[in-house]
Image (tube, rainbow, N blue to C red):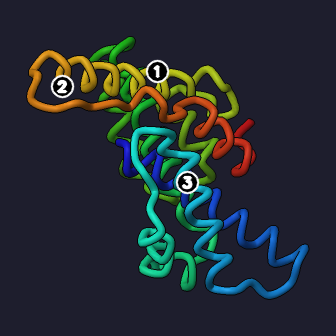
Amino acid sequence: MIATVFRQVAMNRFEDLVHTERREQGELSVERFGELWAESQAEMFGDSVEVTDGYRSWWSYIPHFIGSPGYVYAYAYGQLLALSVYQCYEQTGPELVPRYLELLAAGGSRPPEELGRIVGVDLADPGFWDAGLDLLERRLTEAEEAAQASGACRLRLGTMRIKPAADDLLERVAIR
């Protein structure tokens, strides 16, 4: 979940930073790409991970930035959609399963809003998305607690920004 939601949102922010600066300033140096990459990653990780100088070139190994600009948001969108629909399942129970299977069978054949209606959700409702974010937050809290209880390792995810990061992504894809 961390890689699919947080990391993809951070990558989307990186792309936005690069394209915005390119429009405003002109061509960017490789060094500037690295600075923008480090900035977007440090924002995601907070104080839980040190973003070193050696990490500044890692943007270059992600082919989506070159071959499919703007695509990375789809990973986070899909994960949040799945988590939010799962929350609906937890509330509704097995009666959601046939509609969920219909949603899966429809694939990308209809606009997202129509696909959401199959399972009885309104994709324009922030509450729908918040349900998935709440599930994500609970899972991360459980992981932190389990790591602390084990004493085997120290896991600190508390500084990662859950809702602000996802809210930003949803605004960029015009959900809110």
Q: Which residue is mark 1?
A: 134
Helix or strand or loop: what does disc 2 sit on? helix
Q: Is residue 16 above or below residue 116?
A: below
Earlier-in-chain disc, 1 versus 2:
1
The furthest residue to the right = 24
Q: Which residue is mark 2?
A: 147
Q: Quadrant of residue 58?
A: bottom left
Marks 1,2: beta carbons within 8 A: no
| Foreground disc of the pair 2, 3 | 2
Q: Position of residue 54 (x, y in %)?
A: 42, 72
Q: Could you tell whether 141 is left or right of 37 in the image?
A: left
Q: Residue at x 18, y 25 (%)?
A: 147
Q: Residue at x 56, y 24 (%)?
A: 130
Earlier-in-chain disc, 2 versus 3:
3
Depth check: give the residue in front, 123 or 109.
123
Q: Position of residue 44 (x, y in %)?
A: 53, 45
Depth check: give the residue in front, 81 or 26.
26
Q: Disc 1 and disc 2: Cα gap in Å?
A: 20 Å
Q: Position of residue 81 (x, y in %)?
A: 48, 39
Q: Could you tell whether 34 is left or right of 107 in the image?
A: right
